[in-house]
Image (cartoon, rainbow, N blue to C red):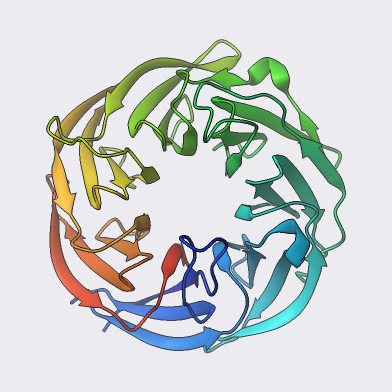
Amino acid sequence: MELLTFFIGSYTEYLIPEFGGIGKGIYTVQLNNTTGELKLLHTKKTRNPSYLSLSQNKRYLYSCTELDEKKSPRIEAYKIEQNFSLQILNTQSIQGGYPCHINVNNSNILIACYASGNIQQFPLDQSGKIFSCRKNLWHTGSSTNKKRQEGPHPHQVSIHPNGRDIYVCDLGIDKVKAYYLKKGVLFSNEEKDCSISRGGGPRHLVFNQLGNIAYVNNELTSDISVLKYNGNKFEEVSAYSSLPKQYNREPSGSAIRIHPNGKFIYAANRKLDAITIFSINETKLNLIGYQYTNGEELREFNITPNGKWLIACHQNSHDIVVFYIRNDGKLNEKFRTKKIFSPVCITFF
């Protein structure tokens, strides 16, 4: 029986009365690659580990505790034991509010702080431990949605396939901000910043394998922006709605993934609680359909590295759904569990 191990982050407390969760921390889970069934192996208690990132050698797992700046958010380093349980190595303070995304780039960790509008760089040593913050860069600006875009709100840090360029989706200023690392220090690369249609609110993006096209899920419109690399920067060349025509509620785009075969884009919407499926023809997307997930607050999903399964997380109904991915890109539900509370992130080992 072939097993695939992964980690799930959760909200363990409420950030505001209407947003948060009752999770227990970081869950270690195994997937049966034949049946799609899930088994909970371990739980590591910590506060609001809303996003996780794995070291490139797969020996260490990193988490940011998504909390208000007054509650002292931290970045945490864990050693992954042979049985896939987690052993804390060390922590460092995060100088910002609501750190909502974390990514590892070689010997550095990069953090996006949604509330305070800044990006932070933390170097790593060879043992996997985190040094104190080396660089703290602040975004500026606003956009047209006065309620949600009154200031910068970086939401995701993405590493380009070339391993050098770094891009940050900022929901508050309708930009994908560009960065690079030079001699171990993070620098802004403003001439490569990419503007997104006003009011869109870019939340998460994915690149194709070549890195010349990117697809952005805009939280405030649920449009998928298609970005093409033209000369020396990305430019938005088209946008596609991920909502059904009859939908009349507030848009709330969340996660976006590209299938490992490069043929399909999957985009999640929380109020719709469905995954929209597109086929890819370079900068053109063709709608395949909608897979309703029958849960509440579809914040995150991920696709297994072998491209066989899509696993979806419902933050508010406390369930995880495993879908089999068909050759045509459509999804068939195979397993569902309510044993994992407030799941909001999936990172594969």
Q: Residue at x 51, y 21 (%)?
A: 144
Residue 104 visible in this rendered orientation of the protein: yes
Q: Position of residue 257 (x, y in %)?
A: 37, 45
Give the left or right position of residue 70, taking residue 39 as reference.
right
Q: Nearer the viewer, residue 64 or 103?
A: 64
In percent of the image, x 23 and y 79: which residue is there?
Answer: 37
Residue 242: quarter of image: top left
Answer with left or right where residue 75 lies relative to residue 213.
right
* Residue 331 x %, y %: 15, 55
Q: Is residue 225 above or below residue 322?
A: above
Q: Quadrant of residue 82?
A: bottom right
Q: Residue at x 57, y 62 (%)?
A: 15
* Residue 338 image position (x, y, % from top left): 29, 80
Residue 349 in view (yes/no): no
In which quadrant of the rendered image does the N terminus lie? bottom left
Q: Quarter-wise, where is residue 56 in the image?
A: bottom right
Q: Position of residue 70 (x, y in %)?
A: 77, 61
Q: Nearer the viewer, residue 302 or 260?
A: 302
